[in-house]
Structure formats: C-alpha cells, structure tokens
Image (cartoon, rainbow, N blue to C red):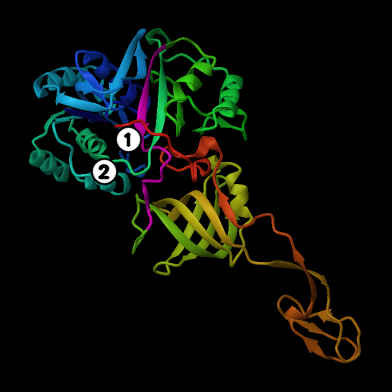
Amino acid sequence: MYVAFDDTDSTESMCTTFLATEVVDAMREYDLIGLPRLVRLNPAVPWKTRGNGALSMRFGEGKGQATLVGMIRDQPIYCYPKMIKPAPTGKIMDRCSYLVEKWSRVQEGASPGLVVSPKRPSQGLYWKAVRDIVEKKEVTDELDRIGAKRFELAGGRGVIGSSAAMSWRPRDRTYEVIAYRERSRWGTPREISDDSVWKMDQRFKTTFNNFDETVGRRAISPHTNCPVLFGIRGDDPFVLPSAMHSVESEPVDRWLLYLSNQGTDDHVVHSWKELVPERSYDVVATVIEGPRTIKGGHVVIGTLTDMGSHLLDMTAYEPSKTFRDIIKQLAVGDRIRAYGEVRESPRTLNLEKLQVLAAVAKFEKVANPRCGQCGKSMQSMGSSGGYRCKKCGAKASEDAAEKRKVERAISVGWYEPPVCARRHLSKPLKREGAAVQRISL
C-alpha cells in the first residue's frame, strides 16, 4: 500500500520529511517496503514553500533481507526489498490523515494532501510535475482511475505533489540521510561543528553538497525553525549513516534514510520549441552581448539560442557569488550550454550551471601598423576609423594594427555555483559519471 503526502509545512516552520518519521513510527505493526522517497518537484512553481519536496512510502508485510534505514527514539527502523501483501487501506488512511491534520501548518498557508493507493499513478505524472505545471483535476482524474483514496485540507493542493511523488520511477537517483532535532531545541540555533562537516566531506567521497569552501561553512543544515538538524546527500546509501554519525552536533532525536531525485537534473527540459516561464531548460546559445553588472550585483549576458533563434538574456544572481566571476569572463562569440529556469519578468534564464563549448580567441593591440609605402608608424583615425600615414597619406584598416593573442581566464568545460547557491535538483558536477550503488527496491 502506497502512502504519499505534500504541502504540510510553511516557509518558516515544520518539514514534510519530519511528518514522514511520524508516519513510519505510527505504522510499526507493518513493514516499510523499500526506502521512503523524498521527491523534489518543479522548483519554479510560484506556490512552493521551500524545496518543493513531497514524500512517498510503501507499507505491507515485508520479505527478504531487512536493512537498517533509521532510528526513532532509540528504536530501529528497517525496510524490506519485497512485499508479500499490502497493509490495509483503512488503517493507513485513518492514522496518516490524523498525523497530517496534527502536524500541517494550515494556519501558515499550507494546503496539505494525502494519497493512499494500492497502485501507483502513471509515471508521466511525475515527469510533468517535475518539469511543468500540473492542474489538480488532471491528478484527481488519475487517482480515480487507479482507485486511490485521498485526504485534503485547505484546498488540498498537496494532492498534486503527493501523487507525483508516488508515481516516480527513478532513472537516476541519489540518497539523503536526515537527522532531526530534539523537540525542546526547535527554534533555537543549531549546534553543529563546521570543522566536523568539512572533515566528513573529505572522508566520505560519495557524498556531495556538504561544505561551501568559498565561504568556509557547512551547507547541510537549514536556516528555518524546522525540526531538521542536518541532511547529508550522496550516491552510496550504505555510507550515509556513518557520515551522519561522524558529524559533531547536538543530540539527534531521530534519523531516516531516503531515496531521492535530488541532484539528478530531472527538472531540466532538454528538447523544446519555445521557452515557457516557470520551467527549466537546457539551452545551447552564442553570446552576442558581453557581460554587464546590474543593480543588486547580478551579472547578465545576451545570447542567441541555437534552437528557434531566440534572443535570450541569461543571469547569474548575486547569491551565486563566485559563479558571477565566471560569467564575467564570457565574450561575444563564445558558444555555451546553459541550464536554468526561465523567468517571465524580466525575461531571462536564471543560470544554474554552464558549459563553455567554445571560447573565441581574444587579441590586444601592441602597436599601430607601419605604412606599407614609406615604413613610418601610422596614426589612428579614431574609433573604428582605421589608420593613416602622416607622411604619405596612405590608409590602413583597423585590423592592420599589430596584435598579440591574450590568454583568457575561461576555458572549455563545465562551471557551477558554489555549494550554498545550488538547487536541490541541480546535478552537481561531482556526480557526473558517478557509480551509483543501489538498494534493491
């Protein structure tokens, strides 16, 4: 029996993943089948809270080798790779709807949705929800088709994310172990050693996005008053608990390991005819206007796309810090491939990462040309006016000046923002070609 829920938190408090631990704890008489799933959806939707993540899990009578995937109040949580029979719909709905109602931040704008189903929705729903905008009726029609039950509060917009998370069949995948705080510490400053996080990052090579070297601080803990202490992401699920235990911090009340689509670039549309706002795209283009810095410290370039010949500004925003320095090195004529979200106003592609496909050669003037008739140094006739010999009047073009090639600070290859400026779904360059170790699900 599949269970999924979404939109239970607010911008300032709670976390839908914490509700997942409460659900797992409440369902102990049944086995957890496979890992709980933390599924991020379209990061550009205007009504998201923080990371636009939904949770999905499966309960029943398990079969096969049990794997330790969490701990709640010193009680271990195991998952099983196969299921003999599902948990009953009624019991799951009763217990989970109670927990959704108890923990949801409806008073802070949450619009929770819970879905319980013996079958998963079509996987096309996931791909649309991670790359596009999905209407609620489209989702409820699909839930009716598969015989799913749902529970809604305050409009129930969370039914969309819940159903999309339930429908996810991974192509690429990562994992995250999340540690949670003791209830008495919620809302207080987190006690985590940055030095221990840095050491963990150096030791556990299959983890990623742990520590931001550009600012010298951790990137594994949230900035809100939610129950999460920290989360560590990686490609190998079996090392994540050890990585978690290596971090020096305040006491951990509970922890749980998740299967996730984070760091996969699933949100990026690679083949398109037009660029629609509130979606993310893979765009190959030529730089036609050099970088300019605008108010706020944002850096903008003008480009002409290969597909459809669209004129498109691309922007590296101030929070991306040193990534802006890369964009400042681009020159007219450079060929690039950019990943990012299209913003409606001002219309621009918000850059997530960039590949330089080809960099044009740049030259600097060393000296004015010499006259081909009398050998004297020629004089400039002004901006783009070429050159003229003062003695005999002979003329030469602007290109006749003596020049030398200048080494550019940018070269062919991929570039990405520092860790603190990366999106949940954006695939870090560290993961390119990663050998992923998988739990049987």
The residue furthest front is 64
The three-letter amino acid code for the residue at tag 1 is: Val
Magenta-colored span? 253-270
Q: In this view, does 265 lie above or below 407?
A: above
Occupied quadrant, residue 329:
bottom right
Q: Residue at x 22, y 22 (%)?
A: 62
Q: How far across and how far down the image is residue 229, in percent? A: 44, 19
Label 1: few (<14), some (14–19) or many (≥20) C-alpha neighbours in 10 Å: many
Using residue 98 as the reference point, say whether residue 252 is left or right of it. right
What residue is shown with label 2?
A: 126
Earlier-in-chain disc, 2 versus 1: 1
The answer, for residue 145, to whether it is visible in the render is yes
Q: Residue at x 41, y 24 (%)?
A: 177
Q: How far across and how far down the image is residue 47, in percent? A: 30, 38
Using residue 348 as the reference point, say whether residue 144 is left or right of it. left
Circle number at residue 39:
1
The answer, for residue 347, to whether it is visible in the render is no
Closest to the observer: 298 or 402?
402
Closest to the observer: 406 or 167?
167
Q: Quadrant of the N terminus?
A: top left
Residue 84 sits inside the magenta stretch: no
Marks 2,1: beta carbons within 8 A:
yes
Circle number at residue 96:
none
